[in-house]
Amino acid sequence: MSSTQEIQSGLAEILEEVAGVTPADATPEKSFTEDLDVDSLSMVEIATAVEDKFGVAIPDDELGNIKTVGDAISYIEKNQG
Amino acid sequence: MTTLKLATGAPGARILGLGAYRPRRRVTNDELAGVMETNDEWIQSRVGIAERRWADDDETLVEMATAAGGKAIAASGLAPDEIDLVVLASASLRQPIPGIGPQVAHRLGIPRPGAMDLNAGCAGFCYSLGLVSDAIRAGSARNAIVIGVERLTDVTDMTDRSTAVIFADGAGAAVVGASDEPGIGPVAWGSDGDQHSAIEIIDSGYMAMAGQAVYRWATTKLTEALTEAMEKAGVTAADIDVFAPHQANLRIIESMTKRLGFGEKTVIARDIVRSGNTSAASIPLALSALMESGEAKSGDLALVLGYGAGLTYAGQVLRLP
């Protein structure tokens, strides 16, 4: 089980790798599309990377509900292990 | 009991010649931006397409297939009457009966070949290549021609910016003949029919695509198919001179390239930038373009993979003619 802090920093690494987001910008209140300029295909890349890193699968229909970094963190927390 | 006689086949099959036909009309992103809510930056960043070709009314499936097929036959050095199997791969026939394989064969001057159409969506060219290679090895055919041809603009809503910027038209062909050294590796093919509605022509008569689902499938599951094609042919990513996957989306091509870990020498086909997504025609179009530009040369090992509606996929390792 990863802590909230570990999930946030792991997600920030993924965002930097996939979409070139500066880790300091990947804070919970940020919207992927509005604030971080992450498009729908990059969201799929993020979902794949999350699955590799945390073992948490995010299906396409769930992906649509994840709007902010905080949404992603809580989804991973709720579904891990 | 009488034992049935079997045909004698060839030790291997290889591509003898490639041919391509690109429709005359070049359509830029700026032209599309004039008729729908889109722009060059958006299209290039999402799918990597700068321009595409759209067929005019006289550039029918039969005309384009005949043009590409004729070039492939000329490049092969064979006479048309040496070909006895024609497989025409297309997913965009508005009139499904009759299939156009026999008519294209007739137009090419190929006398009475086995001829058929094959619909495996964007995977059609690689499925066909697998079948004709096996037919030659089994002795069912001496030489064959595979033609991928599409007029996707006929089945695309030209006001729908999610598909109109992507789909395009064209034809590409390969003549395949017998060889002592195998020049077409074993096919790695399969399908995921549970995702049949991810790419489909809906009631409106136009294409609809679940972009995220297809992207996820292409960038995860298909890496396994590419690895399988290389393993079956006994090669590794370091041996591949040319990587020419179906030209669906530049970001899928880049993602696959990254995952497979090719060496410095591997040339990556990015024909999508100027051709858009031409479904079953995209791989022979991309290979022809690389050979014309000199980026790929005769004898190079190419890894190809078609994938699309069905969902279907097929890939193999080829030696370029």
Image (cartoon, grey):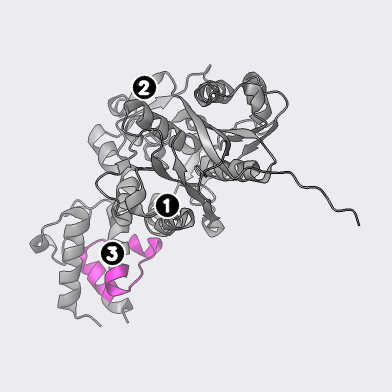
Disc 2 is attached to a residue of which chain? B
The amino acid pointed to by label 1 is Val
The quarter in which the N terminus of chain B is drawn is bottom right
What main secondary structure does the magenta stretch of the protein show? helix
The amino acid pointed to by label 3 is Ala
Disc 1 is attached to a residue of which chain? B
Disc 3 is attached to a residue of which chain? A
Residue B68 location, x and y as percent?
A: 51, 24
Please state the extent of the stretch shown in magenta in the rendering.
Answer: A51-76
**Corner quadrant of residue B299:** top left
- Calculate the distance from the C-alpha at mark 3 to the C-alpha at mark 1: 17 Å
Question: In percent of the image, x 58 and y 24: which residue is there?
Answer: B78
**Corner quadrant of residue A65:** bottom left
Residue B7 location, x and y as percent?
A: 74, 44
Question: On screen, A58 above or below B169?
Answer: below
For marks 1 and 2, the one nearer the N-term is 2
Residue B274 location, x and y as percent?
A: 33, 30
Outermost residue on the right side: it is B1
Question: In percent of the image, x 63 and y 41: which residue is there?
Answer: B136
Outermost residue on the top side: it is B58
Q: Mark 2 = which residue?
A: B26
Circle 3 SS class = helix
- Calculate the distance from the C-alpha at mark 1 to the C-alpha at mark 2: 27 Å
Are discs 3 and 1 located on one and the same chain? no
Task: Identify the disc placed on residue B214.
Answer: 1
Question: On screen, B284 above or below B8?
Answer: above
Q: Please tell me how crowded label 1 is: few (under 14), some (14-19), or many (20+) other residues with Cα within 10 Å.
A: many
The amino acid pointed to by label 2 is Arg
In this orientation, does residue B102 appear? yes
Q: Are marks 3 and 1 in contact (CB under 8 Å)?
A: no
Are discs 1 and 2 located on one and the same chain? yes
Q: Mark 3 = which residue?
A: A49
